[in-house]
Image: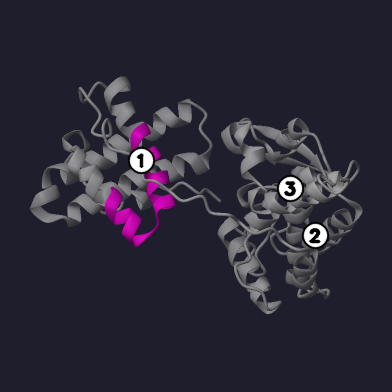
Amino acid sequence: MRLLNLDKITLGVSGTWAGFLRDWDRTLRAGNYPETTRYNYILAVAQLARYLDGMGLEGAEGAQDPTRVKKPHIEAFQSWMISSRSAATALNKHKALQQFFKWLTVDEAEIDRSPMEHVKQPRTAQKLIPIMQDDDTSKILATCRGKSFIQVRDEAIIRLLCNTGARLSEVGFLKVEDIDLNTDSVHYHGKGSKDRRVRFGHRTARALSRYLRARAQHNGAMLPDLWLADRGGRPLAPNGIKIMIRRRGLAAGLTGIHAHRWRHTFAHAWKRARGDSGDLMLLMGWTSDDMPRHYGASAAAERAQETQVRMGIGDHV
């Protein structure tokens, strides 16, 4: 199943915009950009084109041709994104537009200066993501008890997320061949084509083994994708996993449950056990030293308090 469908993404934009986007995608593919990155980049630019088309006369020039987009067009789009979505979403769109107009300027020489040149990035507040308590994870797993295909599949997905701290997209796009039950490890295809192999524990191994046995009897068993939908012989897309996790959370009486919370929890548990930050970066697929500080930040105060008690500063006078 392909994520990127250019005809669908560019629906409603002018032929000029669509042509440029198709050429840009060709450049991104030549640069070995992952499909998810290409999808997010091109979607952001297509959204700008459709927004300008809806502005009427004010955005008419830019709506027809990306080389006529001006700074006020970008700022209006960015403000709309902040008000209709969020500042974080607007920031992601801003970064994608920077890449597109840089390509138009440098690679294609279609414009002399990028309209993004003096557009400020949206400021976003640091959002602390709460960690998952073991009791909450146990409650969610309890909703998967049973022998039906969905119950067995969902337990395997949740245990893999919890046990390895992987991104939703990494787990969601796994192939059958990425699971190795001989070494109890999984081969993740991370951001920026950064692959890594991560070990998992015996409970996750057992859940995956049970799922693979159930999957072998499924009518989509011949597909290369690891996760299958309940019916129709179709793969289960990452968005389907996202919806499943939210539903499992609600069934367990919990709100605000999403895959990324287990990723933060993994980082917190690692740091709490005084694990090496460099090793954590390898396991999580990070290249920036800022990431270990960012993940698990919502639990940093708890770790600091535990250290304070252990050190006993001021208790000996």
Q: Nearer the viewer, residue 256 or 314?
A: 314
Q: Nearer the viewer, residue 135 or 191?
A: 135
Q: Amino acid at mark 3?
A: Ala
Reply yes or no: does residue 92 show up in magenta.
yes
Residue under the point 33% across and 54% down: 81
Discs 3/1, front: 3
Mark 3 surroundings within 10 Å by alpha-carbon count, few (fewer than 14), some (14 through 19), many (20 or more):
few
* Mark seen at residue 216: 2
Give the x, y percent position of residue 90.
37, 49
Secondary element at image label 1 = loop
Mark 1 sits on what residue? 121
* Mark seen at residue 304: 3
Discs 2/1, front: 1
Tell me if label 2 and label 1 are in contact, CB under 8 Å.
no
Look at the image and give the residue range highlighted in magenta: 78-99
Mark 2 surroundings within 10 Å by alpha-carbon count, few (fewer than 14), some (14 through 19), many (20 or more):
few
Q: Amino acid at mark 2?
A: Ala
Secondary element at image label 3 = helix
Q: Amino acid at mark 1?
A: Gln
